[in-house]
Structure formats: C-alpha cells, structure tokens
Image (cartoon, rainbow, N blue to C red):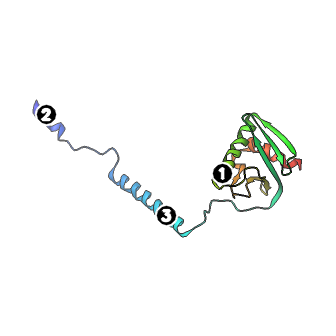
C-alpha cells in the first residue's frame, strides 16, 4: 500500500495557468509600459482629448458651495440660482476639484469659471486661471442639465 501513495505523489503537476500565457501577459505589460514611457519622454500630446468646438453659448459664473446647497452667481456677483439636493452634490463636487487645483497652483479662490456649450451639445466648465477643465457631458443629461439651463438665463 505505501507504494501506491508514492506513485500518486510522483505524478507530474499541472500548472493552473499555462506558462505561455503568463509570459505573453508579461510581454504585453512590458510593451505597454515602453509605449507610455516613450510618449511621456517625447512630449506626445494625448490623442483622446476632444478638440475645441464652436462655442454656441458661454457664461462666466462663480460657485459658492456650502454643505447642503450651491449658490451660482454671475461674474459681477449677481445671483443666478440656488441648487440643492443631488444637483448641489454634483456641482459642489466640481467646485471642490476646482478649489483643490487652485490651491495647488496658489491661485485666488474667488475668480469666475467659464461655462460653455459647444457644438454637438458638449458642455464644459473651465477655470481660466489654472487651465483645469471638465467635459460635463460625460456625466449624463440629468446632472449636466442643471448647468446647461444656466446658459439660457443670460
């Protein structure tokens, strides 16, 4: 009986993941790292960024966010709208990102932002001081519709 248990232990073990697949994936990772490094070192611009389209509507706005609501003012400080609930959460999240970038670049926190509607219904929010920009159309119509309506109140 002990001979049988020995023969079972000496059987060749099978790899769970084939060696060829592991080597192939390692080669793929190395190739991607090499391509990204080459692009970064040569200063290649990212190709996935959308180009500047024709501006169909534009407004300079100021955001004033608190814990439960966001007040939106025009560039002169005149009241435009107050947002609350889900709309306020989305816009205050944008405001936090902008304020973080302004703090990182040591720029004044209370300067206006550029809200633009470009052809193709592309809505963008840009900070002219830092160059920070967000393509808002990617967040969905329900979230960006609030800011798009601000362009109608000019």
**Which residue in the protein does label 3 denote?**
37
How far apart marks 3 and 2 lie (CA) works out to: 56 Å
Answer with the quarter of the image where residue 16 lies.
top left
Q: Residue 73: x and y, percent?
A: 83, 46
Viewer-proximal residue among 82 and 12 = 82
Viewer-proximal residue among 33 and 21 = 33
Answer with the quarter of the image where residue 51 lies.
bottom right
Q: Secondary structure beneath disc 3?
A: helix
Identified at 46% across, 60% down, the residue is: 33
The numbered dot on residue 9 is: none
Mark 1 or 3, nearer chain start = 3
Identified at 72% across, 53% down, the residue is: 108
Q: Residue 121: x and y, percent?
A: 78, 53
* Circles 3 and 2: CB atoms closer than 8 Å: no
**Which residue in the protein does label 1 denote?**
103
How far apart marks 1 and 3 lie (CA) works out to: 29 Å
> Is any atom of residue 121 visible in this view?
no
The numbered dot on residue 4 is: 2
Answer with the quarter of the image where residue 48 lies.
bottom right
Q: Residue 77: x and y, percent?
A: 85, 47
Mark 3 or 2, nearer chain start = 2
Residue 139 vs 40, above or below: the answer is above
Q: Residue furthest top?
A: 1
* Circles 1 and 2: CB atoms closer than 8 Å: no
Mark 1 neighbour density, 10 Å: few (under 14) some (14–19) many (20 or more): few
Q: Secondary structure beneath disc 1?
A: helix
Q: Nearer the viewer, mark 3 or mark 2?
A: 3
Mark 1 or 2, nearer chain start = 2
């Amino acid at each position: 009986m002990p001979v049988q248990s020995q023969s079972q232990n000496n059987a060749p073990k099978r790899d769970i993941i084939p060696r060829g697949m592991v080597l192939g994936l390692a080669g793929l990772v190395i190739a991607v790292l090499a391509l990204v490094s080459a692009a970064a070192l040569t200063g290649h611009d990212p190709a996935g960024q959308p180009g500047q389209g024709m501006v169909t509507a534009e407004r300079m706005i100021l955001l004033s966010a608190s814990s439960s609501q966001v007040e939106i003012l025009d560039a002169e400080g005149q009241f435009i709208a107050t947002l609350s609930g889900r709309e306020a959460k989305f816009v205050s999240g944008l405001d936090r990102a902008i304020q973080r970038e302004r703090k990182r670049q040591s720029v004044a926190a209370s300067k206006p932002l550029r809200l633009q509607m470009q052809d193709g219904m592309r809505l963008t929010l840009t900070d002219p001081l830092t160059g920070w920009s967000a393509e808002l159309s990617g967040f969905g119509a329900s979230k960006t519709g609030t800011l798009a309506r601000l362009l109608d109140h000019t």
